[in-house]
Image (cartoon, rainbow, N blue to C red):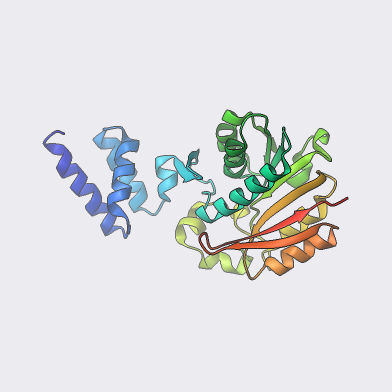
Amino acid sequence: MSEAEPAVAEATVAALRAAGCVFAEEEAALLTAAAGGEEAALAALVARRAGGEPLEHVVGWAGFCGLRMRVGAGAFVPRRRTEFLVQEAVALAAADGRPQPVVLDLCCGVGALGAAVAARLGAGTELHAADIDPGALAYARANTAPYGGRVYEGDLYGALPGTLRGRVGVLLANAPYVPTDEIALLPSEARDHEPPVSLDGGPDGLDVHRRIAAGAPPWLAPGGRLLIETSGRQAPHTAAALEAAGLAVRTVESEEFWATVVIATRTV
């Protein structure tokens, strides 16, 4: 360590603390690593973080299910609570025992859910991902590439190739579910730096959930499952939409992740 490095480290931590970063020491270490030892680069990164950008956007990656997912400015950052959905999906797929599970990450954003599920299921997994946001899909292609992911741009099922119809065993959906009037209540990191299309679920937060539910049955394989993240308050309404589509539905919750997932199964 050079004589200047301790002073730079102290200045970095001090700048982050002054900006209100609760975990200033940990963030300083991540920013320093991202800067690659270049003081000018570090100063630029610290300025971006102190200016309110999400740490993940600044360093270029987000930790999710033990993996590093590439993210960047304007992308939705995968949340830790969504790891619960991944756990449930992997457990169900493993119990099914299909040698080549077909996984679809709908409203995929940067592709974190699909990549994490494919990483855990291992070789033989056929991974597909779709989103309406071309910026997010640039990251999704990178994050799903190690697992042979195929990525499509478009609005929900309209993005998908017809060859997927009736074949999807695991359909993952972390669609936007924040009511429009509650966007203003979100932390500024989300409100100001993530795309509205990844947050805004319409007047009651369930517009996209209803569309996913209505369109799901033709794409699911017999016995295939759709897992969709929602809130405890909204779960009964998400479940009702899935039941109206003819799917068998149950809701699971996790105190550890503070998360709620509705699981729907195509039984016929």
Residue sitting nearer the eye, 237 or 87: 87
**Residue 259 visible somewhere in the drawing:** yes
**x, y (%) of residue 174?**
63, 52
Name the outermost residue toward the bottom.
233
Q: Position of residue 212 (x, y in %)?
A: 76, 53
Quarter where residue 162 is shown:
top right
Q: How many marks?
A: 0
- Residue appearing at x 54%, y 49% in the figure: 76
* 68 relative to 21, above or below: above
Q: Residue furthest left?
A: 3
Q: Residue at x 32, y 36 (%)?
A: 35
- Closer-to-camera residue (20/100): 100
- Front in this rendered view, residue 115 or 186: 115
Task: Name the residue: 60% across, 30% down.
Answer: 147
Q: Which quarter of the rendered picture does the N terminus lie within?
A: top left
Percent of width and height locating residue 97: 72, 39
Residue 105 in view here: no
Q: Position of residue 77 (x, y in %)?
A: 51, 49
Q: Identify which residue is drawn at 53% across, 66% down.
A: 184
Q: Which of the 4 image quarters holds residue 115? A: top right
